[in-house]
Image (tube, helix red, strand yellow):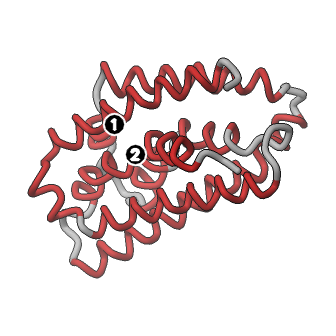
Amino acid sequence: MIDFISVFIFLFAVIDPIGTVPVFIAVTRNEDERSKRRIALRAVLVSAAILTFFVIGGEVILTAMEIPVSAFQIAGGIVLFLFALTMVFGESKPEQELGMVGGNHDPAVYPLSVPSMAGPGAMLAAVMLTRKATYSIGEQVQTVVTMYAVLLFALVLMLLATRIHRVGGDSGASVISRVMGLLLASLATTSALGG
């Protein structure tokens, strides 16, 4: 059985539903309520599909490329740690992704799904938390269910985005993103050490 709290925090930090709220508000500012709901749902479904692909196929790709899972675990931990440092010291996730808003593309896919929710950190986490050599099928399923729970939480936050933004604003999302970065740095260090 997995440690649900640890896995939930890990996935919450890399998917960062709270940091997605200001990005969602920015890309849907000219949309009506029905369109906003449709964009939010589509963004979550696309993110779930991408992350599920990495759960199922990530390790297969590594094996085909003859990359040991232990090497990927160390590299993944380092990348997640660097990602966490940018969350703590650099522009926060919402600030980075607000700069991507604009252009003629589906906002549900870019930037909401990729890179906001299903970004590189989340893809790495999906592979690292479901390694077949370490986790049983039951534990992998529990991790995927936890991942879907985080995405569902992201959907709820996007549906309530206008009200949430009134309370916390961009600065509130930025502060929470930095705290998540600190937690992610700790979890990434544990992962790189083989914990």
Badge 1 marks a residue whose secondary structure is: helix
Spatial separation of the CA atoms under disc 2 and disc 1: 8 Å
Residue 175 x, y percent position in the rendering: 22, 34
- Residue drawn at point x = 77 percent, y = 53 percent: 56
- Residue drawn at point x = 66 percent, y = 18 percent: 193
Q: Is residue 147 left or right of residue 130?
A: left
- 194 is higher (above) or lower (below) than 172: above
Quarter of the picture containing the C terminus is top right
Q: Is residue 55 left or right of residue 120?
A: right
Dot 2 or dot 1, earlier in sequence: 2
Task: Please state which of residues 98 and 176 is positioned toward the viewer in this rendering.
Answer: 176
Q: Give the foreground label among 2 and 1.
A: 2
Residue 144 x, y percent position in the rendering: 64, 57
Q: Using the rendered view, name the quadrant where residue 142 is placed.
A: bottom right
Residue 61 x, y percent position in the rendering: 82, 40
- Residue drawn at point x = 66 percent, y = 47 percent: 2
Task: Please state which of residues 67 and 18 is positioned toward the viewer in this rendering.
Answer: 18
Few, some or many C-alpha atoms within 10 Å of disc 2 (few <14, some 14-19, many ≥20)? many
Q: How many numbered markers are drawn?
A: 2
Residue 122 x, y percent position in the rendering: 55, 42
User: The residue under label 2 is which amino acid type?
Assistant: Asp
Q: Which residue is mark 2?
A: 16
Q: Are marks 2 and 1 in contact (CB under 8 Å)?
A: yes
Q: Which mark is residue 58?
A: none
Q: Which residue is mark 1?
A: 93
User: The residue under label 1 is which amino acid type?
Assistant: Lys
Q: Is residue 82 left or right of residue 111?
A: right
Badge 2 marks a residue whose secondary structure is: loop
